[in-house]
Image (spheres, rainbow, N blue to C red):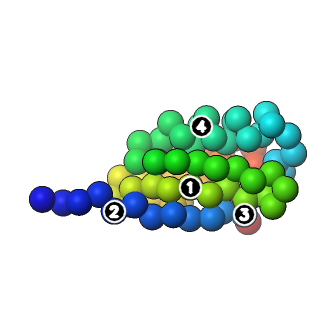
Amino acid sequence: METNVFEKATIQVKGMSCNHCVSAIEGSVGKLNGVQSVEVDLEKGMVVVSFEKNSISLDSIKDEIEEQGYDVL
């Protein structure tokens, strides 16, 4: 039986400035299949995401952030 392997990644994101940005990223990334949790730190310009690496790739998560209009560094 395959076990779920969760990975935690910190992504540098440019362009986040307010609580709407936090809601947009947490909402869209949080809905992705395989994402366990999303935390946005506005001050540091970081998104910390915990995800099941067998279900979704880090690149897919970064693509979703970019689709919301932010720049992934």
Q: How far is the residue under mark 4 from the one under mark 1?
A: 12 Å
Quadrant of the drawing holding the N terminus: bottom left
Point out residue 16 in the picture as x, y percentages from the top left corner. 82, 48
Q: Considering only vertical position in the picture, is 48 above or below 22? A: below
Task: Please say if the residues under marks 4 and 3 sit with CB atoms less than 8 Å apart.
Answer: no
Q: Residue at x 51, y 63 (%)?
A: 8
Say if mark 1 contacts mark 2, CB within 8 Å: no
Q: Which residue is mark 3?
A: 12
- Which residue is disc 1 drawn over? 49
Quick check: marks 4 and 1 in contact, CB under 8 Å?
no
* Mark 4 surroundings: few (<14), some (14-19) or many (≥20) residues within 10 A: some
Tell me the distance, in whole angstroms, between the alpha carbons under discs 1 and 2.
Answer: 14 Å
User: Which amino acid type is shown beneath numbered disc 4?
Assistant: Ser
Whole-number angstrom distance, CA of label 3 to CA of label 1:
11 Å
CB atoms at circles 2 and 4 under 8 Å apart?
A: no
Viewer-proximal residue, 25 or 73?
25
Instruction: Between label 3 and label 2, give the one nearer the viewer.
Output: 2
* Residue tagged 2: 5
